[in-house]
Every structure is written in C-alpha cells, then in structure tokens.
Image (cartoon, grey):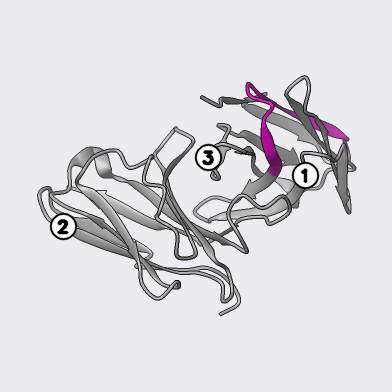
Amino acid sequence: GAGVSQSPSNKVTEKGKDVELRCDPISGHTALYWYRQSLGQGLEFLIYFQGNSAPDKSGLPSDRFSAERTGGSVSTLTIQRTQQEDSAVYLCASSLAAGSYNSPLHFGNGTRLTVT
Amino acid sequence: KQEVTQIPAALSVPEGENLVLNCSFTDSAIYNLQWFRQDPGKGLTSLLLIQSSQREQTSGRLNASLDKSSGRSTLYIAASQPGDSATYLCAVMDTGRRALTFGSGTRLQVQP
C-alpha cells in the first residue's frame, strides 16, 4: 500500500481481556516501530524491529506487552490482561532502516484503545 | 537518557505571520532530528529530517535548523496559513538507541 496501515482504528475492550493490534508497514521498509500516545502525554517508544535482528524491547512497560513481526513485514502488538492505564493511541511507524542518517519515519493513523 | 523539550506548548497567531517553534535536546550524540506535524485524530506526518552533519533543511515555507553542539533546533514557518494549524513534534534519533525520542509538541493555531 501507499502508507503504513493499522487495524483496527478503534478498539474497546473490557479490563482483563487480551487485545491484538496490527500494523502493515510500507513495502520495502525494514524498520518497524511501535509507539504509544496517551492523553496529554508525548509519544512513548515501545519496541522496534530492524530486519532479522533481535528487536529492541526496551520501551515495553510490562511483561503484559509483546510484539512480533512475521516475515519481516506485518507486525502484531499484543497486550494481555488489559488495564485501564493501557488506554491510549498505539502508533506504528516504518522506515527504510533503523538508525539511518536520512530515513524519516512514516506513521500510520494509529489504533485508539479504550479499556473499560 | 535523552530528553526533548519543546517551547512554547501552544501558540496562536494571525494568518500571514512568520513564526518559530523551538526544540532542545540533552544528548548531542544523535543520528538525525526530525520534525512532524500531527492533525487531530491522525498519525504523524514527516516534515523535515536534518542529519547530524547538516545545519538546516528547507521544504516550501518550512525551514528547520540544527545546532547539535548546543542541543537546539528551530522550525521556521513563513507566511502562516490556517491549514498550518496542527501540533508540531520534534524528535531526535540517538546513536545509542535507534528509535526516536519525542518532545511533547507545540500546538499551533493560525487564525484566519
């Protein structure tokens, strides 16, 4: 596709349920990032993937959060046993290569997660 | 740990004014600095990327400068238009962790 695609655009779930958020990066982009944007706060880095290298998981807030990237393309962010503080917009981005001097990040429109 | 600060947090100007948004960062070991805009309910749109070896980048009415040694960047918007109304975010990519660290943004309102 022409841009980064995220689904669903909105997700409402009950506290304690698991959720999966999906990201389709731009074709040919080897780097994929997940960020979280909470109301009134800035963007918080969660995890990034670069090609076949081990992902940088340093931003994941707890072991309830995990992510995988299959075949170097589509990524899924999973939140287990959701809590109300997980409510936020989850943004995915991709770029030609992580840590490149001149590769800007391209963001999707995000998934708005509401935990009731 | 890298910290990025943006000033002001909000700005309202009449149409046609030139304006400057400020960004500062604490660790000068960066690959690049990127400016984005975010419209309500949308993702981020990349505006400009300045490599660590560069001093400025220009795109249309936008000009971004980088002073890596002092940890500062400015985004200059010439002849502002109502369509420029959005939140502008500054972010730096560290050499240590290859992910962007974002500032909290400047919310810009251009009055017609």
- Which kind of residue does numbered mark 2 sit on? Asp
Give whichever of A62, A7 is nearer the camera. Answer: A62
Identify the subunit bearing mark 3.
Answer: B
Q: Of helix, strand and loop, which one carries label 2?
A: loop
Separation of marks 3 and 2 at Cα, in angstroms? 29 Å
Q: Of helix, strand and loop, which one carries label 3?
A: loop
Residue A109 percent across, percent down from the top left: 49, 60
- Which kind of residue does numbered mark 1 sit on? Gln
C-beta proximity under 8 Å, tags 3 and 1: no
Q: Which residue is mark 3?
A: B97
In this rendering, the label closer to the viewer, 3 or 2? 3
Task: Look at the magenta stretch and give its main secondary structure.
Answer: strand
C-beta proximity under 8 Å, tags 1 and 2: no
Residue B67 percent across, percent down from the top left: 82, 27
Magenta-tinted stretch = B17-34
Marking on residue B51: 1
Give whichever of B75, A102 is nearer the camera. Answer: A102
Instruction: Please state if B32 lies on the left or on the right of A82 as rendered.
Output: right
Rendered view: A59 above or below B21: below
C-beta proximity under 8 Å, tags 3 and 2: no
Identify the subunit bearing mark 1.
Answer: B
Q: Estimate how packed mark 3 is, as few (under 14), some (14 to 19) or many (20 or more) residues with alpha carbons within 10 Å.
A: some
Residue A21 percent across, percent down from the top left: 31, 63
Residue A28 percent across, percent down from the top left: 59, 74
Identify the subunit bearing mark 2.
Answer: A
Q: Estimate how packed mark 2 is, as few (under 14), some (14 to 19) or many (20 or more) residues with alpha carbons within 10 Å.
A: some
In this rendering, the label closer to the viewer, 1 or 2? 1
Q: Which residue is mark 2?
A: A18
Rendered view: A99 above or below B26: below
Q: Residue at x 58, y 32 (%)?
A: B103
Instruction: Please state if A29 lies on the left or on the right of A82 as rendered.
Output: right
Query: Can you tell which quarter of the image residue B43 is in?
Result: bottom right
